[in-house]
Image (spheres, rainbow, N blue to C red):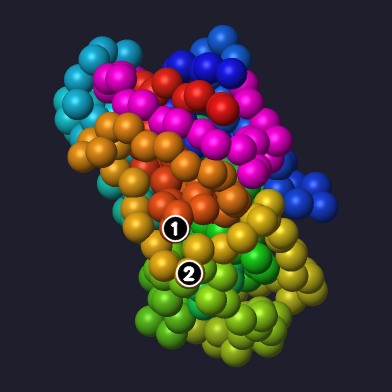
Amino acid sequence: MRYEGVLTKMRTEITDKVQYYLIFEDDFINMNQLLGKTLSINFLRYQCLNCGLQKKIFRQGYCYDCFNSIPQAGDWVISPELSKAHLDEEDRDLEFEKRAQLQPHVVYLANSSDVKVGVTRRSQIPTRWIDQGAHEAIEIVEVPNRYLAGITEVALKSHVSDKTNWRKMLTNDVLDLDLAEIRENLKQYIPEEAREYYLANNKETEIEFPVLEFPKKIKTLNLGKTPFYEGVLKGIKGQYLLFEDGTVFNVRGHEGFVIELQVK
């Protein structure tokens, strides 16, 4: 079987185990069905996810010009505390920013390698947790806009990490933690503006990933440096494909790369 298309992050749905789908323009693949099979990945060219031109990808699937101009790549995306739509202030496109920022957001705890705090839109749960490779997660607050979520995250990350150790996550070097207890301990640090939105009764969400075998040592595949790779797929976690020889491939990190994928 042969497929060709531009990479975007895998779509997911949560069942007993997470189901992963690689979506191309004219086709899609249920990646779970490829576990145990030999895959070859051949990098063909770049294609910016915004302008569609064959220009080198700079970041997040966008070429340099698009990344520095489109509202989807504004600083508030990575740093929610910089959001200003609630003040009616424009960054790059106020109407877009209002749609994205002025909707319910959640500050959460996720355990991928160790406990971390993060922010996402309510509509992106549990997708965000799956993308981070979290085997358990819990909400802390649900607030009406991105700014309130951002300042809450900033306050809490003085007491708990906001980073994932992706190597530990991919080797499954993780522990089960009592996230509800950690949430309760962090409650005192929530900014006053967000305290009324504290979620005291939400339960942990547990997530199981489709992995036949976790790698013991990891080597990353960068298609910009190594344009061809072949190996046996042993698992999928977060947005990573895990191969038998310890190679891991970050699909989301290669958004905007046009590839040929063959299943043997």
In the rendered structure, find residue 246 and report the number of the disc placed on it.
1
Q: Are marks 2 and 1 in contact (CB under 8 Å)?
A: yes
Q: Is residue 34 above or below residue 131?
A: above
Instruction: Please state the horizontal and vertical placement of residue 102, each as a whole percent of the image.
Output: 52, 42
Q: Which corner quadrant holds the C terminus?
A: top right
Type of amino acid at the residue the image marks with label 1: Gly
Q: Give the residue drawn at x 69%, y 84%.
A: 178
Q: Is 119 positioned to the left or the right of 122 in the image? A: left
Cα separation between marks 2 and 1? 7 Å
Type of amino acid at the residue the image marks with label 2: Lys
Mark 2, residue position? 216
Instruction: Please state the horizontal and vertical placement of residue 164, each as a whole percent of the image.
Output: 44, 67
Question: Dot 2, how many residues are within 10 Å of its Cα: few (below 14), some (14-19), or many (20+)?
Answer: few
The secondary structure type at the circle numbered 1 is loop
Q: Give the residue drawn at x 61%, y 81%.
A: 175
Instruction: Please state the horizontal and vertical placement of residue 232, each as a whole percent of the image.
Output: 54, 44
Q: Residue furthest top?
A: 26
The secondary structure type at the circle numbered 2 is loop
Q: Give the residue drawn at x 38%, y 81%.
A: 158
Tell me if residue 136 can be seen.
yes
Instruction: Please state the horizontal and vertical placement of residue 25, each as a whole percent of the image.
Output: 52, 13
In the rendered structure, find residue 160 and report the number of the disc placed on it.
none
Q: Is 203 positioned to the left or the right of 38 in the image? A: right
Residue 33 drawn in magenta: yes
Q: Give the residue drawn at x 67%, y 68%.
A: 136
Q: Which corner quadrant holds the N terminus?
A: top right
Residue 31 drawn in magenta: yes
Quadrant position of residue 227:
top left
Is residue 182 or residue 25 the one in the foreground?
Answer: 25
Q: Is 24 positioned to the left or the right of 31 in the image? A: left
- Stretch in magenta: 28-50
